[in-house]
Every structure is written in structure tokens, then in C-alpha cells.
Image (cartoon, rainbow, N blue to C red):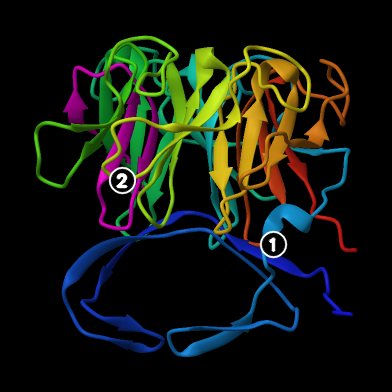
């Protein structure tokens, strides 16, 4: 009988730009390379895993984890508004473990806000002057990625129909890197290629570095529910094999498109809107662990679900207690992320807050 402790660590997706050609622990040679570190679940169990020069222990996957059922508010929670202790229908989220900070796309305030762990107020790091289309403005930002080493964010700015890069450390204003796109979700693979969901063309495109035109990698065959179609795709996630996972929002399902595929497979939901464990209702935020288990912000069911790889139904991990303001409730959970300790963060959009659910030691 195995003796597995519950000290779990999760590395969230992180973009790193380094001056290295070959990277090992403590050794590097100089050349600029952009990589993304994909999430991995670790804990102090009996399985040894060697990563480069470092040996660690690793949990099989996150599917066995549990979280407290009553969340703690770590950003917002002071009603709808534009003050620095408030949010206005937040959307995307990024967790920066190294600097102990939470970044969120504060949609209706047209800004990106940084909340240090334990802070009562946030700090505006992009936008926030006015909601608009100027070089210092955003209009309903929906998703963000952060390159901590170079100090810039990549932001979906959907009502301005653009994806922008914003240097936030020195408050340099934005540069449009993809124009004329009805973007919603963004992700990046380990080659530094950018993926963007388009809610009007019902597709996901991949943009290689230096290219001015994207390549369709999911959908692109008009609005519909066939396996080669999407219907208002929202959040996306790219795994280590460059498979594209898509929250197919209006089809109430999550789709997986392997690299080069002409059609996707349904990996969660797909039975129309509903509240059963086999159903989703307008899903949004996604997280995939290395074993292929899927974590979903099931927005209109006010819950977060986990679908084990290959399963025909999911399980509720937090929420699912009716729509409300209680610490065990949500009001349109929009996106999610995990920190390196396995704690879960949920953007509780219509409650104007971000909730943290600690992983349970068992």
C-alpha cells in the first residue's frame, strides 16, 4: 500500500524569455529563446522524476486532489466599481508565483489589475485611463499572458478587435500585434507561437513569430456543432503536444484538436446545456494537467468541474451550490488558474471578485 503525502505543487503555464540556447540547472549558453513551461503536478510521494539536473518526486495527476469548499476572496469583493479595491466583471486571470501576484483582466473597467497576495487594493498595470481605443486604452479586455522576464503582457482587446502587447514595468503603452480580430482567448505553445480564439469566425488561429497571417488550427468551417465546427469559442489551452483545447461556449462542450487535425473530438459535455454531471452550460476557463485531466469553469452552472481523461462525465470540485454570494457559491465563474502549491483561483465574474480555494491535505 503506497504512502502518498498531500504536499502538492503545480507549475502553471509560464512564458519565459531567456538568454539561453541550451538550458540545464545552473548551466546556460547565450542566445535569446522564448519558451513556455507547461503545467506539471508534483508532490512528495514515492515516484522519483528526473528533470534535467534535478530529481524530484511527482504525484500521478491532480485528479486525486480535493479543495476546501469555502473560498477566500483575494481580489475585489467590494461590489461593482472602478476603485482599486473593486472589480467590474473580471474575466481572464494569470498567477505569478515568483512575485506572489494575481493579474486579472478587469473587463468593464478596461484595465489589467495586479493584486499582490494579501493586498486589499490592486494596482493598474495596463489601461484604466478610459475605456477606449487609444494607445493607452483597452475596451473589455478578456484574456492575458505575461512574459515576466521582458516585462510585457499580451492582452486580448476584443471590442477594439486586436491583440496587444503592453510593457507594464515601465508603463509603456500598447503595440498592436494582431489587428482586426474578434479575439477572446489566448494561449502560447513552447515554440512561442500564439493561439487566439475568434468568436465571430468561430475558429482558433495559430500565429507563428514574425508572421502576419494566422493559420486555422480549430474550427474555421462556419458556426455549427459538427466536429469540424465551433460556436463562439472562448478560452483555450495548449498542451505539451500542441493539441488545442477549446471551450466551445455555445455548443456547451470542450473540444480537443490534435496538431494538424481537420476536426476535433468532444472531451467534455456536448449534450446541450444542462446541470447533470455529463453536461456543461456555456463553459469558459480551462486548465489541463499533464495526465490530460480537464478543469473547467462551467459558467452558467456556477461550478468548477474536473473531467478525468477519457471520462464521459465530470465531478464538481468547487461551487455547484446555486448562484449566490456565499463563500461556497459563484455568480458566473469565468476563468480559473492554479498556483504552484495546487491552490485553485476562480474569477467569480458577476460577484466582482476572485476566490481562492486551498488544496486539502489528506
Query: Above or below — where is 84 with respect to 49?
Result: above
Residue found 40% across the figure and 18% down from its top: 230
Q: Label 2 to label 1, Cα distance in Å?
A: 30 Å
**Direction from residue 330 to residue 32 in the image, left or right:** left
Give coordinates of residue 308: x percent, y percent.
67, 46
Predominant secondary structure in magenta? strand
Q: In the rendered view, tell whether residue 174 sits above or below residue 55.
A: above
Say which mark, if any, is on residue 121: none
- Label 2 neighbour load within 10 Å: few <14, some 14-19, many 20+: few
Q: Position of residue 99 (x, y in %)?
A: 54, 59
Side (left or right) of 250 relative to 131: right
Give the residue pinned by disc 1. 341
Quadrant containing the N terminus in the rendered view: bottom right
Give me the residue at 25% from left, 47% from top. Answer: 193
Q: Quadrant of residue 357?
A: top right
Secondary structure at badge 1 equals loop
Question: Up-down: is 41 above or below 205?
Answer: below
Question: Residue 177 or 286: which is nearer the viewer?
Answer: 286
Q: Is residue 102 left or right of residue 172?
A: right
- If you read the primary sequence from the N terminus, does the residue marked by circle 2 or circle 1 appear first? 2
* Vertical side of 271 occupied by 343: above or below: below
Residue 336 percent location from the top left of the image:
61, 38
Q: Secondary structure at mark 2?
A: loop
Task: State whether residue 349 appears in this view.
Answer: no
Residue 256: image quadrant is top left
Disc number lying in front (2 or 1): 2
Residue 158 inside the magenta-drawn segment: no
The residue located at (54%, 55%) in the rendering is: 12
Which residue position is annotated with label 2?
259
Q: For the C terminus, which image quadrant?
A: bottom right
Residue 180 in the magenta stretch? The answer is yes
Residue span colored magenta = 169-197
Amino acid at each position: 500500500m503506497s504512502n502518498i503525502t498531500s504536499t502538492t505543487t503545480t507549475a502553471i503555464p509560464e512564458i519565459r524569455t531567456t538568454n539561453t540556447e541550451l538550458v540545464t540547472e545552473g548551466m546556460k549558453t547565450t542566445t535569446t529563446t522564448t519558451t513556455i513551461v507547461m503545467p506539471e503536478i508534483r508532490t512528495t510521494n514515492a515516484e522519483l522524476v528526473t528533470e534535467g539536473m534535478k530529481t524530484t518526486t511527482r504525484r500521478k495527476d491532480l485528479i486525486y486532489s480535493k479543495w476546501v469548499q469555502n473560498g477566500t476572496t483575494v481580489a475585489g469583493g467590494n461590489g461593482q466599481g472602478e476603485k482599486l479595491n473593486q472589480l467590474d466583471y473580471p474575466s481572464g486571470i494569470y498567477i505569478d508565483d515568483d512575485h506572489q501576484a494575481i493579474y486579472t483582466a478587469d473587463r468593464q473597467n478596461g484595465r489589467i489589475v495586479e493584486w499582490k497576495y494579501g493586498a486589499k487594493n490592486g494596482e493598474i498595470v495596463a489601461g484604466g485611463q478610459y475605456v477606449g481605443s487609444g494607445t493607452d486604452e483597452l475596451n473589455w479586455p478578456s484574456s492575458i499572458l505575461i512574459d515576466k522576464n521582458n516585462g510585457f503582457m499580451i492582452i486580448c482587446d476584443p471590442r477594439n478587435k486586436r491583440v496587444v502587447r503592453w510593457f507594464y514595468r515601465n508603463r509603456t503603452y500598447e503595440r498592436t500585434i494582431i489587428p482586426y480580430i474578434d479575439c477572446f482567448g489566448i494561449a502560447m505553445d513552447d515554440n512561442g507561437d500564439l493561439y487566439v480564439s475568434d468568436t465571430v469566425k468561430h475558429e482558433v488561429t495559430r500565429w507563428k513569430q514574425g508572421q502576419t497571417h494566422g493559420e486555422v488550427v480549430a474550427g474555421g468551417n462556419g458556426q455549427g456543432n459538427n466536429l469540424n465546427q465551433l460556436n463562439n469559442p472562448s478560452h483555450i489551452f495548449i498542451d505539451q503536444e500542441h493539441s488545442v483545447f477549446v471551450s466551445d461556449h455555445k455548443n456547451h462542450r470542450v473540444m480537443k484538436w490534435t496538431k494538424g487535425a481537420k476536426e476535433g473530438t468532444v472531451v467534455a459535455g456536448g449534450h446541450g446545456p444542462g446541470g447533470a454531471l455529463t453536461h456543461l452550460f456555456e463553459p469558459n476557463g480551462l486548465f489541463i494537467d499533464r495526465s490530460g485531466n480537464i478543469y473547467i469553469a462551467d459558467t452558467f452552472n456556477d461550478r468548477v468541474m474536473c473531467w478525468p481523461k477519457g471520462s464521459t462525465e465530470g465531478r464538481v470540485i468547487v461551487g455547484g451550490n446555486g448562484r449566490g454570494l456565499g463563500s461556497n457559491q459563484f455568480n458566473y465563474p469565468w476563468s480559473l488558474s492554479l498556483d504552484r502549491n495546487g491552490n485553485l483561483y476562480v474569477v467569480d465574474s458577476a460577484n466582482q471578485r476572485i476566490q481562492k480555494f486551498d488544496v486539502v491535505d489528506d
